[in-house]
Amino acid sequence: MKVLVLNSGSSSQKMCLYEIGEDLPRDPPTCVWEARVEWESTHCAMVTRNARGHTRRAEVQVASRTEALKQLLATLWTGDDRVVSRVKDIAVVGHRVVHGGPEYEVPAFITEDVKAGIAAASAFAPLHNRAELEGMDTVEQVMGDVPQVAVFDTGFHRKMPLPAVVYPGPYKWFEQGIRRYGFHGINHQYCAERVAQLLNKSLKSLRVVSCHLGNGCSLAAIRDGHSIDTTMGFTPLEGLMMGTRSGSLDPGILTYLMRRDQATGEQIDDVLNKESGLAGVSGISGDMRLILAAIQEGNERAKLALDIYIHRLQAGIGSMVAALGGLDALVFTAGVGENSAEVREATCSNLEFLGVKLDEEMNAKPRLDADIDAVNSKVRVLVIRAQEDWAIARECWKLARNRQAAE
Ligand code: ADP
């Protein structure tokens, strides 16, 4: 079964095609085709890679995002690098939907109702949800009635208990949808399942803290296979310090800035999302690699930025462990989590009281999807590669198979 996955961002679009047989493979397979478009106002850069590893890069003039998407989709079945002979060879198309609102928990076939639900939730994540709806409409125009599936990044956190969901503001906020949703759910869920598989244990028996440390950062506390707490909330701004996002702050700062500088909502949004975090404190960049390099050169602000990042990460892990009532496995995933031995070491350095102990050598050179804990560590520590697209493809495969079986 050929499954196409679309992952839309506000200024980029990623796609990949998976070929899945009769059974799901144990390990995530490499996709047979992948493509990426980055847009500027009137043109975009398209990069495609086919199954033979052949990469093609093109700058194209486009009138709209939809146009770019159509061109990109067409490269699947036309031209020298095509990977299918006709559109109908693709059995199902999956979309990552950033915000499912209060309603959506599990992956769903896209219908007019589901689209209306996603449009309603776009009040909470306007840039993302609109781009995703545009992707669904474009697929419909180009690929006709191919089944499409929405997989929600908020879905995994939908079973969080109310104390982890309701903000301690006026109760009517909650009734108006102002509540903690949590994000990165597709990857947190994938990581928890992968941990159980790698440790050969039932997910039900494990208390897992998953640390998704990419440009955006969040933690999830997972018990019985469900997220029971997470650090991101109403928006992906809450919680940990991130590349350019502040994470949690005293809300009094915002009202102070509004009074002192007559700052508008838009300006505050920009500061918190684009000019804060590692970039804001260091004045260098939100890229952890550049922060670590600057520390090597003796830059003190870069060192302070990293120290805050670790301080908040440790505090967040402490709070997740308290929600779980203990810890069996700690997972590091996404760009920083997978690649930075320094960050993993610094994070775990204060967690020995919980029974977390790293194996120095394995931490320095981890194999992906493997453990890095010392023999006498009471807690298993694993590095797991973020595989959102594969996780979405799997969900599509399952839904499509169930539908076929029911027909
Ligand atoms: P996103 O959240 O956008 O999906 P990624 O998961 O790809 O992002 O993470 C991107 C971040 O990973 C980069 O900003 C960079 O800071 C970090 N990163 C990538 N490689 C390394 C590395 N070798 N060491 C430290 N940080 C790294």
Image: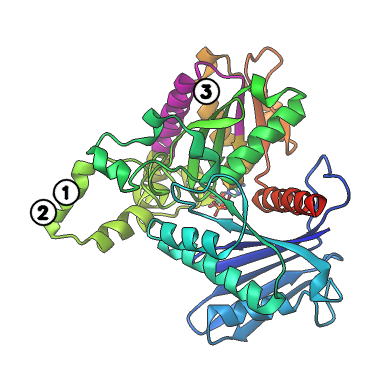
Taking 294 as reference, is 362 above or below it?
Answer: above
Report crowding for label 3: few under 14, some 14 to 19, many 20 or more residues within 10 A (C-alpha): some
Query: Disc 3 and disc 1: Cα gap in Å?
Result: 36 Å
The percent coordinates of residue 167 (x first, y second) are 31, 36
Mark 2 — residue? 259
Are the residues flagged by discs 1 and 2 in contact, CB closer than 8 Å? yes
Chain-order first, disc 3 or disc 2: 2
The percent coordinates of residue 401 (x first, y second) are 79, 51
Q: What residue type is labelled 3?
A: Ser
Magenta residues, start to end: 306-331
The residue depicted at 67 percent of the width and 38 percent of the height is 384
Q: In this view, does 406 lie to the left or right of 64?
A: right
Taking 268 as reference, is 133 above or below it?
Answer: below
Mark 3 — residue? 349
User: Nearest the camera: 82 or 3?
Assistant: 3
Mark 1 — residue? 255
Report crowding for label 2: few under 14, some 14 to 19, many 20 or more residues within 10 A (C-alpha): few
